[in-house]
Image (cartoon, grey):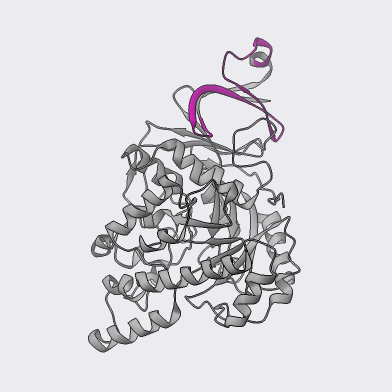
Amino acid sequence: MILIHKATIINEGASFIGSVLIEKDIISEIYKADVPEAILNKATVIDAKGLWLLPGVIDDQVHFREPGLTHKGDIATESRAAIAGGVTSFMEMPNTKPQTTTIENLERKFELGAEKSYANYSFYMGATNDNIAELKKADRKNVCGVKVFMGASTGNMLVDDKKVLQAIFAEIDMLIATHCEKEEIIRENIAKYKAELGEDIPIQYHPLIRSTEACYLSSAEAVELADKYQARLHILHLSTEKEISLFDIKPLSEKKITGEVCVHHLWFSDEDYSKYGTRIKWNPSVKTIQDRDALTQGLLKGKLDVIATDHAPHLLEEKQGGALKAASGGPLVQHSLQMMLEQAKRGKITKEQVVAKMCHAPAELFQVHKRGYIRRGYFADLALVNPNKPYTITRDNILYKCKWSPLEGETFSTSIEKTFLNGKIAFDNGTVNEVRGEMLRFDR
Protein backbone atom coordinates (compact mmCIF):
# COMPACT_ATOMS: atom_id res chain seq x y z
CA MET A 1 0.00 0.00 0.00
CA ILE A 2 1.07 3.58 -0.70
CA LEU A 3 -0.43 6.50 1.18
CA ILE A 4 -0.04 9.97 -0.33
CA HIS A 5 -0.48 11.91 2.89
CA LYS A 6 -1.97 15.37 3.35
CA ALA A 7 -1.67 16.64 -0.20
CA THR A 8 -3.76 19.44 -1.65
CA ILE A 9 -6.01 17.32 -3.82
CA ILE A 10 -7.25 19.12 -6.96
CA ASN A 11 -10.16 17.17 -8.37
CA GLU A 12 -13.68 17.68 -9.74
CA GLY A 13 -13.70 21.45 -9.32
CA ALA A 14 -12.41 21.55 -5.75
CA SER A 15 -9.14 21.75 -3.85
CA PHE A 16 -8.84 20.30 -0.35
CA ILE A 17 -6.29 18.79 2.00
CA GLY A 18 -6.57 15.02 1.95
CA SER A 19 -4.81 11.69 1.65
CA VAL A 20 -5.06 9.01 -1.03
CA LEU A 21 -4.50 5.33 -0.36
CA ILE A 22 -3.29 3.16 -3.26
CA GLU A 23 -3.58 -0.61 -3.15
CA LYS A 24 -2.09 -2.44 -6.11
CA ASP A 25 -3.18 -0.38 -9.14
CA ILE A 26 -6.31 1.18 -7.65
CA ILE A 27 -7.23 4.16 -5.49
CA SER A 28 -8.79 2.32 -2.55
CA GLU A 29 -9.62 5.25 -0.29
CA ILE A 30 -9.64 9.04 -0.15
CA TYR A 31 -9.38 10.58 3.31
CA LYS A 32 -10.55 14.14 3.90
CA ALA A 33 -9.95 13.84 7.65
CA ASP A 34 -7.32 12.01 9.67
CA VAL A 35 -6.00 8.71 8.32
CA PRO A 36 -6.56 5.71 10.63
CA GLU A 37 -3.48 4.79 12.63
CA ALA A 38 -3.57 1.23 11.30
CA ILE A 39 -3.19 2.54 7.72
CA LEU A 40 -0.38 4.91 8.69
CA ASN A 41 1.49 2.04 10.29
CA LYS A 42 0.97 -0.36 7.40
CA ALA A 43 1.36 1.78 4.28
CA THR A 44 4.41 3.31 2.64
CA VAL A 45 3.72 6.95 3.49
CA ILE A 46 4.62 9.77 1.10
CA ASP A 47 4.56 13.12 2.89
CA ALA A 48 2.77 15.44 0.46
CA LYS A 49 2.24 18.50 2.67
CA GLY A 50 2.38 21.61 0.51
CA LEU A 51 2.17 19.59 -2.72
CA TRP A 52 -0.68 19.39 -5.23
CA LEU A 53 -2.11 15.98 -6.15
CA LEU A 54 -3.81 15.83 -9.56
CA PRO A 55 -5.20 13.04 -11.73
CA GLY A 56 -2.71 12.01 -14.40
CA VAL A 57 -3.10 14.04 -17.59
CA ILE A 58 -4.74 12.33 -20.59
CA ASP A 59 -3.35 13.74 -23.85
CA ASP A 60 -5.73 13.00 -26.69
CA GLN A 61 -3.38 14.01 -29.50
CA VAL A 62 0.29 13.05 -29.84
CA HIS A 63 2.63 11.96 -32.62
CA PHE A 64 5.22 9.57 -31.19
CA ARG A 65 6.64 8.78 -34.67
CA GLU A 66 6.79 4.99 -34.47
CA PRO A 67 7.02 3.09 -36.74
CA GLY A 68 9.04 4.55 -39.56
CA LEU A 69 9.99 8.02 -38.27
CA THR A 70 11.95 6.99 -35.21
CA HIS A 71 14.87 9.33 -35.89
CA LYS A 72 12.54 12.04 -34.51
CA GLY A 73 11.04 10.11 -31.60
CA ASP A 74 9.62 6.74 -30.67
CA ILE A 75 7.03 5.30 -28.31
CA ALA A 76 9.58 4.66 -25.56
CA THR A 77 11.34 8.04 -25.62
CA GLU A 78 8.25 10.19 -25.98
CA SER A 79 6.19 8.27 -23.41
CA ARG A 80 9.07 8.61 -20.93
CA ALA A 81 8.93 12.36 -21.52
CA ALA A 82 5.16 12.27 -21.00
CA ILE A 83 5.50 10.48 -17.66
CA ALA A 84 8.09 13.05 -16.53
CA GLY A 85 5.47 15.71 -17.23
CA GLY A 86 2.60 14.08 -15.33
CA VAL A 87 0.96 12.77 -18.51
CA THR A 88 -0.11 9.20 -17.76
CA SER A 89 -2.17 8.36 -20.88
CA PHE A 90 -1.88 9.27 -24.55
CA MET A 91 -3.75 8.75 -27.80
CA GLU A 92 -1.39 8.56 -30.75
CA MET A 93 -1.95 9.64 -34.34
CA PRO A 94 -1.85 7.46 -37.49
CA ASN A 95 0.54 9.39 -39.78
CA THR A 96 3.51 7.07 -39.24
CA LYS A 97 5.29 4.85 -41.79
CA PRO A 98 3.42 2.70 -42.56
CA GLN A 99 0.32 4.72 -41.80
CA THR A 100 -2.18 3.29 -39.34
CA THR A 101 -4.90 2.86 -41.95
CA THR A 102 -5.32 -0.92 -41.79
CA ILE A 103 -6.20 -3.25 -38.93
CA GLU A 104 -2.88 -5.03 -39.43
CA ASN A 105 -0.91 -1.82 -38.94
CA LEU A 106 -3.09 -0.84 -36.00
CA GLU A 107 -2.46 -4.17 -34.27
CA ARG A 108 1.28 -3.69 -34.77
CA LYS A 109 1.02 -0.31 -33.03
CA PHE A 110 -0.70 -1.93 -30.05
CA GLU A 111 2.10 -4.51 -29.92
CA LEU A 112 4.66 -1.71 -29.85
CA GLY A 113 2.70 0.04 -27.10
CA ALA A 114 2.61 -3.07 -24.94
CA GLU A 115 6.34 -3.62 -25.49
CA LYS A 116 7.68 -0.09 -25.13
CA SER A 117 5.28 2.46 -23.65
CA TYR A 118 6.00 4.03 -20.27
CA ALA A 119 2.45 5.48 -20.21
CA ASN A 120 -1.03 4.13 -20.90
CA TYR A 121 -1.86 4.19 -24.59
CA SER A 122 -4.36 4.01 -27.38
CA PHE A 123 -4.06 4.64 -31.12
CA TYR A 124 -6.26 6.26 -33.75
CA MET A 125 -7.19 4.60 -37.02
CA GLY A 126 -6.48 6.90 -39.95
CA ALA A 127 -9.04 7.53 -42.67
CA THR A 128 -8.19 7.67 -46.37
CA ASN A 129 -10.27 8.03 -49.51
CA ASP A 130 -10.48 4.24 -49.84
CA ASN A 131 -10.32 2.48 -46.45
CA ILE A 132 -13.80 2.80 -44.97
CA ALA A 133 -14.16 -1.01 -44.81
CA GLU A 134 -11.05 -1.15 -42.59
CA LEU A 135 -12.36 1.64 -40.35
CA LYS A 136 -15.50 -0.36 -39.67
CA LYS A 137 -13.41 -3.26 -38.32
CA ALA A 138 -11.83 -1.18 -35.52
CA ASP A 139 -12.75 -2.22 -31.97
CA ARG A 140 -14.52 0.66 -30.19
CA LYS A 141 -13.38 -0.73 -26.83
CA ASN A 142 -9.67 -0.08 -27.39
CA VAL A 143 -9.39 2.28 -30.39
CA CYS A 144 -9.80 5.89 -29.28
CA GLY A 145 -11.20 7.13 -32.60
CA VAL A 146 -10.89 7.65 -36.33
CA LYS A 147 -8.62 10.47 -37.48
CA VAL A 148 -9.69 12.40 -40.57
CA PHE A 149 -7.37 14.91 -42.22
CA MET A 150 -9.80 17.38 -43.81
CA GLY A 151 -6.86 19.52 -44.82
CA ALA A 152 -3.07 19.64 -44.56
CA SER A 153 -2.32 16.63 -46.72
CA THR A 154 -0.31 13.90 -44.99
CA GLY A 155 0.73 11.31 -47.57
CA ASN A 156 -2.49 9.83 -48.92
CA MET A 157 -4.39 10.67 -45.72
CA LEU A 158 -6.04 13.87 -46.97
CA VAL A 159 -9.68 12.86 -47.29
CA ASP A 160 -10.89 15.18 -50.02
CA ASP A 161 -13.50 12.98 -51.70
CA LYS A 162 -16.87 14.44 -50.65
CA LYS A 163 -18.68 11.13 -50.95
CA VAL A 164 -16.11 9.39 -48.77
CA LEU A 165 -16.35 12.14 -46.15
CA GLN A 166 -20.11 11.77 -46.08
CA ALA A 167 -19.80 7.99 -45.76
CA ILE A 168 -17.37 8.31 -42.84
CA PHE A 169 -19.71 10.62 -40.95
CA ALA A 170 -22.76 8.53 -41.82
CA GLU A 171 -21.42 5.03 -41.28
CA ILE A 172 -18.59 5.07 -38.72
CA ASP A 173 -19.93 4.39 -35.24
CA MET A 174 -16.96 5.85 -33.41
CA LEU A 175 -15.57 9.23 -32.41
CA ILE A 176 -14.32 11.09 -35.51
CA ALA A 177 -11.38 13.39 -34.76
CA THR A 178 -10.59 15.93 -37.48
CA HIS A 179 -7.73 18.13 -38.57
CA CYS A 180 -9.58 21.02 -40.20
CA GLU A 181 -7.87 23.32 -42.68
CA LYS A 182 -9.17 24.02 -46.19
CA GLU A 183 -6.52 22.80 -48.59
CA GLU A 184 -7.74 24.90 -51.53
CA ILE A 185 -7.43 28.13 -49.54
CA ILE A 186 -3.95 27.18 -48.35
CA ARG A 187 -2.85 26.51 -51.93
CA GLU A 188 -4.28 29.86 -53.08
CA ASN A 189 -2.46 31.69 -50.29
CA ILE A 190 0.82 29.95 -51.09
CA ALA A 191 0.51 30.99 -54.72
CA LYS A 192 -0.28 34.57 -53.69
CA TYR A 193 2.70 34.96 -51.37
CA LYS A 194 5.09 33.15 -53.73
CA ALA A 195 4.16 35.70 -56.39
CA GLU A 196 4.89 38.52 -53.94
CA LEU A 197 7.89 37.16 -52.05
CA GLY A 198 9.39 34.31 -54.04
CA GLU A 199 9.93 30.71 -53.00
CA ASP A 200 11.38 31.41 -49.55
CA ILE A 201 8.41 32.90 -47.70
CA PRO A 202 9.32 34.15 -44.18
CA ILE A 203 7.82 32.29 -41.22
CA GLN A 204 5.78 35.37 -40.23
CA TYR A 205 3.51 34.60 -43.21
CA HIS A 206 2.67 31.11 -41.98
CA PRO A 207 -0.56 32.22 -40.20
CA LEU A 208 -1.56 34.15 -43.32
CA ILE A 209 -1.06 31.09 -45.52
CA ARG A 210 -2.82 28.73 -43.11
CA SER A 211 -5.35 31.42 -42.41
CA THR A 212 -8.36 31.90 -40.18
CA GLU A 213 -10.62 31.36 -43.17
CA ALA A 214 -8.89 28.07 -44.06
CA CYS A 215 -9.53 26.80 -40.55
CA TYR A 216 -13.05 28.12 -40.13
CA LEU A 217 -14.48 26.88 -43.42
CA SER A 218 -13.08 23.39 -42.88
CA SER A 219 -14.32 23.21 -39.27
CA ALA A 220 -17.73 24.49 -40.37
CA GLU A 221 -17.89 21.73 -42.98
CA ALA A 222 -17.08 19.11 -40.34
CA VAL A 223 -19.77 20.45 -38.01
CA GLU A 224 -22.30 20.47 -40.85
CA LEU A 225 -21.54 16.83 -41.66
CA ALA A 226 -21.72 15.81 -38.00
CA ASP A 227 -25.05 17.58 -37.57
CA LYS A 228 -26.46 16.02 -40.71
CA TYR A 229 -25.49 12.45 -39.83
CA GLN A 230 -25.59 12.77 -36.01
CA ALA A 231 -21.95 11.70 -35.85
CA ARG A 232 -19.67 12.06 -32.83
CA LEU A 233 -17.20 14.76 -33.89
CA HIS A 234 -14.12 16.05 -32.06
CA ILE A 235 -12.27 18.89 -33.82
CA LEU A 236 -8.59 18.96 -32.94
CA HIS A 237 -6.19 21.88 -32.32
CA LEU A 238 -8.57 24.80 -32.83
CA SER A 239 -6.60 27.97 -33.44
CA THR A 240 -9.00 30.83 -34.18
CA GLU A 241 -11.58 32.96 -32.41
CA LYS A 242 -13.95 32.54 -35.34
CA GLU A 243 -14.16 28.75 -34.95
CA ILE A 244 -15.47 29.08 -31.38
CA SER A 245 -18.84 30.19 -32.77
CA LEU A 246 -19.34 26.64 -34.10
CA PHE A 247 -19.62 25.16 -30.59
CA ASP A 248 -22.38 25.18 -27.96
CA ILE A 249 -22.26 25.83 -24.25
CA LYS A 250 -23.71 22.74 -22.64
CA PRO A 251 -22.53 19.93 -20.34
CA LEU A 252 -19.92 17.72 -21.97
CA SER A 253 -22.13 14.66 -21.45
CA GLU A 254 -24.74 16.25 -23.73
CA LYS A 255 -22.36 17.18 -26.55
CA LYS A 256 -21.92 15.30 -29.81
CA ILE A 257 -19.55 17.96 -31.21
CA THR A 258 -16.52 18.91 -29.11
CA GLY A 259 -13.36 20.94 -29.51
CA GLU A 260 -9.73 20.64 -28.45
CA VAL A 261 -7.20 23.42 -27.90
CA CYS A 262 -3.47 22.78 -27.80
CA VAL A 263 -1.07 24.33 -25.31
CA HIS A 264 0.94 26.15 -27.97
CA HIS A 265 -2.14 28.00 -29.22
CA LEU A 266 -2.77 29.11 -25.62
CA TRP A 267 0.86 30.10 -24.96
CA PHE A 268 2.26 31.68 -28.14
CA SER A 269 0.97 34.30 -30.59
CA ASP A 270 2.09 35.55 -34.00
CA GLU A 271 4.15 38.21 -32.21
CA ASP A 272 6.45 35.38 -31.07
CA TYR A 273 7.59 34.35 -34.58
CA SER A 274 10.28 37.04 -34.49
CA LYS A 275 11.78 35.43 -31.36
CA TYR A 276 11.23 31.70 -31.93
CA GLY A 277 11.04 31.48 -35.72
CA THR A 278 10.13 28.08 -37.11
CA ARG A 279 10.41 26.46 -33.68
CA ILE A 280 6.79 27.53 -33.19
CA LYS A 281 5.63 26.49 -36.65
CA TRP A 282 2.60 24.23 -36.28
CA ASN A 283 -0.34 23.29 -38.44
CA PRO A 284 -2.77 24.91 -37.77
CA SER A 285 -0.60 27.95 -37.27
CA VAL A 286 -0.13 30.03 -34.14
CA LYS A 287 -2.25 33.10 -34.78
CA THR A 288 -3.01 36.44 -33.10
CA ILE A 289 -3.13 37.45 -29.44
CA GLN A 290 -6.85 37.97 -29.92
CA ASP A 291 -7.23 34.39 -31.15
CA ARG A 292 -5.09 33.07 -28.27
CA ASP A 293 -7.10 34.89 -25.61
CA ALA A 294 -10.42 33.95 -27.19
CA LEU A 295 -9.46 30.26 -27.11
CA THR A 296 -8.80 30.53 -23.38
CA GLN A 297 -12.18 32.18 -22.89
CA GLY A 298 -13.81 29.47 -25.01
CA LEU A 299 -12.43 26.88 -22.59
CA LEU A 300 -13.57 28.80 -19.53
CA LYS A 301 -17.09 29.31 -20.87
CA GLY A 302 -17.47 25.64 -21.75
CA LYS A 303 -17.62 26.03 -25.52
CA LEU A 304 -14.28 24.22 -25.91
CA ASP A 305 -13.55 21.08 -23.99
CA VAL A 306 -10.03 19.64 -23.93
CA ILE A 307 -6.45 20.89 -23.64
CA ALA A 308 -3.87 18.68 -25.41
CA THR A 309 -0.45 19.02 -27.05
CA ASP A 310 -0.32 17.71 -30.63
CA HIS A 311 3.20 16.69 -29.54
CA ALA A 312 5.08 16.26 -32.84
CA PRO A 313 8.88 16.09 -32.60
CA HIS A 314 11.22 16.91 -35.47
CA LEU A 315 14.98 17.19 -35.53
CA LEU A 316 16.17 20.80 -35.34
CA GLU A 317 17.63 20.55 -38.84
CA GLU A 318 14.14 19.64 -40.09
CA LYS A 319 12.82 22.88 -38.57
CA GLN A 320 15.14 25.01 -40.71
CA GLY A 321 13.72 27.18 -43.47
CA GLY A 322 10.77 29.50 -43.84
CA ALA A 323 6.99 29.17 -43.95
CA LEU A 324 7.08 26.51 -46.68
CA LYS A 325 10.24 24.50 -46.06
CA ALA A 326 10.47 24.03 -42.28
CA ALA A 327 8.65 21.04 -40.80
CA SER A 328 5.49 21.81 -38.86
CA GLY A 329 5.14 20.57 -35.29
CA GLY A 330 7.11 20.56 -32.08
CA PRO A 331 7.68 18.61 -28.86
CA LEU A 332 5.56 19.64 -25.85
CA VAL A 333 4.28 16.61 -23.92
CA GLN A 334 6.90 16.79 -21.15
CA HIS A 335 5.93 20.34 -20.20
CA SER A 336 2.24 20.76 -21.06
CA LEU A 337 0.98 20.45 -17.49
CA GLN A 338 3.56 22.93 -16.22
CA MET A 339 2.63 25.33 -19.04
CA MET A 340 -1.01 25.30 -18.01
CA LEU A 341 -0.27 25.53 -14.29
CA GLU A 342 1.87 28.56 -15.15
CA GLN A 343 -1.14 30.04 -16.94
CA ALA A 344 -3.09 29.41 -13.74
CA LYS A 345 -0.43 31.27 -11.73
CA ARG A 346 -0.85 34.19 -14.16
CA GLY A 347 -4.60 34.25 -13.57
CA LYS A 348 -5.57 33.09 -17.07
CA ILE A 349 -7.29 29.94 -15.79
CA THR A 350 -7.67 28.24 -12.40
CA LYS A 351 -5.77 25.12 -11.44
CA GLU A 352 -9.14 23.36 -11.01
CA GLN A 353 -10.02 24.26 -14.62
CA VAL A 354 -6.64 22.98 -15.82
CA VAL A 355 -7.45 19.61 -14.23
CA ALA A 356 -10.95 19.67 -15.70
CA LYS A 357 -9.70 20.28 -19.24
CA MET A 358 -6.57 18.09 -19.20
CA CYS A 359 -7.75 15.15 -17.07
CA HIS A 360 -11.52 14.95 -16.53
CA ALA A 361 -12.75 16.12 -19.95
CA PRO A 362 -10.68 13.75 -22.12
CA ALA A 363 -11.69 10.86 -19.85
CA GLU A 364 -15.37 11.72 -20.20
CA LEU A 365 -15.23 12.69 -23.86
CA PHE A 366 -13.54 9.44 -24.94
CA GLN A 367 -15.28 7.37 -22.23
CA VAL A 368 -11.96 6.18 -20.84
CA HIS A 369 -12.49 3.36 -18.34
CA LYS A 370 -11.80 4.47 -14.73
CA ARG A 371 -9.14 7.09 -15.39
CA GLY A 372 -8.95 10.87 -15.36
CA TYR A 373 -10.31 11.41 -11.84
CA ILE A 374 -9.21 10.89 -8.25
CA ARG A 375 -12.01 8.52 -7.26
CA ARG A 376 -12.27 5.41 -5.15
CA GLY A 377 -12.01 2.35 -7.42
CA TYR A 378 -10.27 4.24 -10.24
CA PHE A 379 -6.79 3.44 -11.52
CA ALA A 380 -4.12 5.25 -9.54
CA ASP A 381 -2.80 7.50 -12.32
CA LEU A 382 -1.68 10.60 -10.45
CA ALA A 383 0.70 13.57 -10.63
CA LEU A 384 2.25 15.10 -7.54
CA VAL A 385 3.26 18.71 -8.18
CA ASN A 386 5.39 21.07 -6.12
CA PRO A 387 3.81 24.52 -6.65
CA ASN A 388 6.76 26.37 -5.13
CA LYS A 389 9.78 24.71 -6.73
CA PRO A 390 10.96 26.55 -9.87
CA TYR A 391 11.95 24.45 -12.87
CA THR A 392 13.97 25.70 -15.83
CA ILE A 393 13.88 23.81 -19.13
CA THR A 394 17.39 23.08 -20.37
CA ARG A 395 18.88 20.80 -22.99
CA ASP A 396 20.04 18.54 -20.13
CA ASN A 397 16.58 17.83 -18.69
CA ILE A 398 14.67 17.45 -21.96
CA LEU A 399 13.73 13.79 -22.48
CA TYR A 400 12.48 14.02 -26.06
CA LYS A 401 14.55 12.06 -28.56
CA CYS A 402 14.93 15.22 -30.66
CA LYS A 403 16.56 16.92 -27.60
CA TRP A 404 15.07 20.39 -28.01
CA SER A 405 12.02 22.34 -26.96
CA PRO A 406 10.60 25.69 -28.09
CA LEU A 407 10.45 26.44 -24.34
CA GLU A 408 14.20 26.07 -23.65
CA GLY A 409 15.25 28.65 -21.06
CA GLU A 410 11.70 29.06 -19.74
CA THR A 411 11.39 28.86 -15.94
CA PHE A 412 8.13 27.51 -14.52
CA SER A 413 7.13 28.08 -10.91
CA THR A 414 6.01 24.43 -10.53
CA SER A 415 7.86 21.11 -10.73
CA ILE A 416 6.56 17.60 -11.24
CA GLU A 417 7.71 15.67 -8.14
CA LYS A 418 6.24 12.23 -8.82
CA THR A 419 4.01 10.51 -11.35
CA PHE A 420 2.05 7.41 -10.39
CA LEU A 421 1.03 5.00 -13.14
CA ASN A 422 -1.43 2.24 -12.27
CA GLY A 423 -0.36 2.52 -8.64
CA LYS A 424 3.39 2.43 -9.27
CA ILE A 425 5.82 5.33 -8.96
CA ALA A 426 6.78 5.85 -12.60
CA PHE A 427 8.60 9.17 -12.16
CA ASP A 428 10.37 10.30 -9.02
CA ASN A 429 12.19 13.64 -8.72
CA GLY A 430 13.89 13.58 -12.09
CA THR A 431 14.10 9.83 -12.63
CA VAL A 432 11.79 7.79 -14.87
CA ASN A 433 11.41 4.28 -13.49
CA GLU A 434 11.05 1.12 -15.55
CA VAL A 435 7.25 0.94 -15.34
CA ARG A 436 5.14 0.06 -18.36
CA GLY A 437 1.73 1.43 -19.26
CA GLU A 438 -1.44 -0.43 -20.16
CA MET A 439 -3.81 -0.30 -23.11
CA LEU A 440 -6.64 2.14 -22.50
CA ARG A 441 -10.14 0.72 -22.44
CA PHE A 442 -13.22 2.67 -23.43
CA ASP A 443 -16.71 2.23 -21.96
CA ARG A 444 -18.61 2.29 -25.23
Q: Quadrant of the N terminus?
A: top right
Foreground residue among 390 and 105: 105
Is 431 situated above or below 263?
above
Q: Is residue 15 magenta?
A: yes
Where does residue 269 sit, x and y in percent of width and height? 30, 59
- Taking the image as shown, residue 426 lies to the left or right of residue 408, namely right
Is 410 situated above or below 400?
above
Residue 344 in which image quadrant: top left
Residue at the location (65% across, 44% down)?
A: 435
SS majority, magenta: strand
Where does residue 5 sit, x and y in percent of width and height? 56, 21
Q: Is residue 335 visible?
A: no
Where does residue 24 sit, x and y in percent of width and height? 72, 32
Residue 227 in which image quadrant: bottom right
Q: Is residue 425 visible?
A: yes
Q: In this view, which residue lies farthest toward the bottom?
A: 195
Where does residue 183 sit, x and y in percent of width and height? 45, 79
Q: Is residue 71 magenta?
A: no
Residue at the location (52% across, 76% down)?
A: 154
- Taking the image as shown, residue 236 lies to the left or right of residue 289, namely right
Residue at the location (47% across, 75% down)?
A: 152
Is 286 situated above or below 218?
above
In magenta, the rendered stretch is 10-39
Residue 23 in which image quadrant: top right
